Amino acid sequence: MSEAEAPVAELVAVRKEYTAGAVTALAGVSLQVGRSTFLSLEGPSGCGKTSLLNLLGLLDVPSSGSVRWNGRDAGRLPERERARLRLAGVGFIFQRFHLLPTLTAAQNVELPLRAIRRPAAQRERRVAELLDRVGLTARAQAYPHQLSGGEEQRVAVARALANGPGLLLADEPTGELDRASADTVLDLLVSAHRDSGAALVVVTHNPEVAARAQRHLVMRDGRILSDSAAE
Amino acid sequence: MSWRQAGRELRHLRFQTALALCAIAVAVALPVVLLSVGGGVVAHELDALQHSGFQIVVGASGLHGISSTHTLSSRIGALANVRASSPLLSLPLTVFLPGGGEAPVLAEGVIPGPFLATASPQESGLFPQPLPLGDPTDSVHFANGTYRGPATNSILLSSPLATARGIGTGDRIGLSASGNRSQTTEFNVTGTFGLPPSLLGPTGAFVAILPLSDLQLRSGTALSGSGALIDGSDSIEVALSGSAASDSGAVASVASAIQGLVPYYDVATQDQQVAALLDAESVLTGFYLALSSFSLAIGFVFLGVLLVRRVEALRAPIALRRAVGVPARSLAGEFARTAVALGAGGAALGVVAGIVVVRVLAAYGSPAVSAVAQLAVFDPVQLLGIAAAVVAVAMLLSLAATRAALRLSIPEALR
Ligand SMILES: Nc1ncnc2c1ncn2[C@@H]1O[C@H](COP(=O)(O)OP(=O)(O)O)[C@@H](O)[C@H]1O
Ligand SMILES: [Mg+2]
């Protein structure tokens, strides 16, 4: 399989245990996330959804099994390497926004661009473009505490898109938003996925999200219970 | 992250930041006070030494002091380039006052002429001139070692003594070395003199000056029990004439000529005394720095704890940066900037606090403390050195914070 055909990210028989094996969060999960797919992931609290996303996004290291990115075993690379891969390869959107409180909306969006050492002029242009995309041009200089929850999450989406990653991972991105904001954020994610061709994995309890996804997974007790792609 | 950003982060943890700044400021203030005051006192002493009216001191180690003082002093006075040779004898005596009271005084026996000639301009301004102690050479009473000549029995009292005890020119007082009223000799108070401001406060404020031969007779350092000549004194101050006084080669050659006369006495030039003083200063500076390093260590412990605590307080933002993929060296740079801001801010505060403390002591301290504090000199190079050292250690400490930040588990911090 050439790199171009390989899944963006792949779990192979992954187990994840916490507190020295006392908690098993993932009990042997295999999953391929193909290019440009939109995958939704559902399951009761504690079934291992966040753990799965963290492993897919190289934020955490599997207890056993392997994590592959574009066909390459990346799950156990040193943190420095994984950080480098994350910077260009993945955009995270967390349930609780997780903007940097001391940075403005624009500076939050700029963070990954700075880290990848884009020249200032390019950064400025890209930040303007991204804020325009999420409809927050007017709020560029606002601090997170001055933004509504929906606005904060839109800033987080813009930040996740900054370096043009091939993989977008959203962990219950609308869990704490009202209906209207949730729709806006979701539309942004879906259109970003469609426009950029990035694979999108969304953890959600929202049936509407699941309905829009190409592929739907249900998890239970650290395992994948059903996968619409397999049916 | 920029410096402005570092500032905003610090404001975010205001209380901790204020505590760490205070700890460093206090730590820095101590060496600032010690070094400025210590340096100031030494500079003052050096200045006094360099502006004193004499260049060479003859002293005697051991109990007995200098003997045959009158003869020795005139032989020294006859050497080339010597302008004046002034022996001094200091002893505690009891003064019995006309009203019946008594007071302990420090009595100084001098030869009036050379005494004024070896005084610095500042000192000689404090005395009536010529010194109203009779025979300026003290040779009439001394009478070639017989002490049979007519004594003037004149004495000068320091103005603090005269004021405190209500004595003035023209009064008669009794003087006794044994403190026994029945063994007093009567003296005429022929004048009073001011005292130079002293670093040691009121000690030495009760001073009496009288002719050397008179004091020798009172204290038993004139003749021995068997009648043999002692003619004792503690030291002889030697002033050189004209340009020789400021020529260290000339001073050294006169010193060696004097040493040739009295191989068994100590002959010290002012250059040697300056060197000894500078030696003492460097020892003191080392001591101050050792003392200060203790307070600095406490300040650094505070800063270290704060920096590591910040990692705890900022777990989520740090984990978020790392999740995004911000490289470790950017995080390290961020912590270094924070540490430098705290270190430099604390050091600046500490320098200001130290200067304020010294100024307040100078203005409102007790007289002795105030006198010392007024001498303080603030050496910018030294102050910058302290600040630079603090900043350097702060940067080292930031490495500990970076380590803690990189050990943080990202998924746990973002839960
Ligand atoms: N860092 C951790 N330490 C210990 N247990 C953990 C940790 N993270 C998750 N868990 C446990 O692992 C299981 C799966 O958690 P998680 O992946 O967060 O599930 P979900 O996102 O589906 O709610 C849960 O039982 C949770 O309590
Ligand atoms: Mg979860």
Image (cartoon, rainbow, N blue to C red):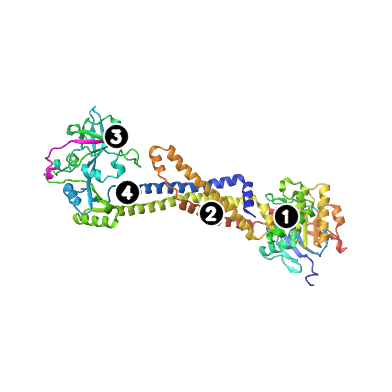
Rounded to the nearest whole Å, what is the CA distance between mark 1 and mark 4? Answer: 69 Å
Residue A142 in sight:
yes
On what subunit does the disc labeled 4 rest? B
Quarter of the image for residue A229 reads bottom right
Same chain shared by disc 2 and disc 4? yes
Same chain shared by disc 1 and disc 4? no
Same chain shared by disc 3 and disc 2? yes
In the image, the residue with mark 4 has its CB under 8 Å from the nearest atom of ligand 1: no
Dot label at residue B391: 2
Question: Which residue is under mark 1?
Answer: A109
Question: Which residue is under mark 3?
Answer: B159
On what subunit does the disc labeled 3 rest? B
Same chain shared by disc 2 and disc 1? no
On what subunit does the disc labeled 2 rest? B
- Look at the numbered disc 4 and give the secondary structure of its residue: helix
Rounded to the nearest whole Å, what is the CA distance between mark 4 and mark 3? Answer: 24 Å
Residue stretch in magenta: B142-162
Disc 2 packing (10 Å; few <14; some 14–19; many ≥20) = many
Same chain shared by disc 4 and disc 3? yes
Q: Nearer the viewer, residue B23 or A146?
A: A146
Picture quarter with ligand 1: bottom right
Rounded to the nearest whole Å, what is the CA distance between mark 1 and mark 3? Answer: 80 Å
Rounded to the nearest whole Å, what is the CA distance between mark 3 and mark 2? Answer: 52 Å
Q: Amino acid at mark 1?
A: Val
* Residue drawn at point x = 30 percent, y = 47 percent: B52
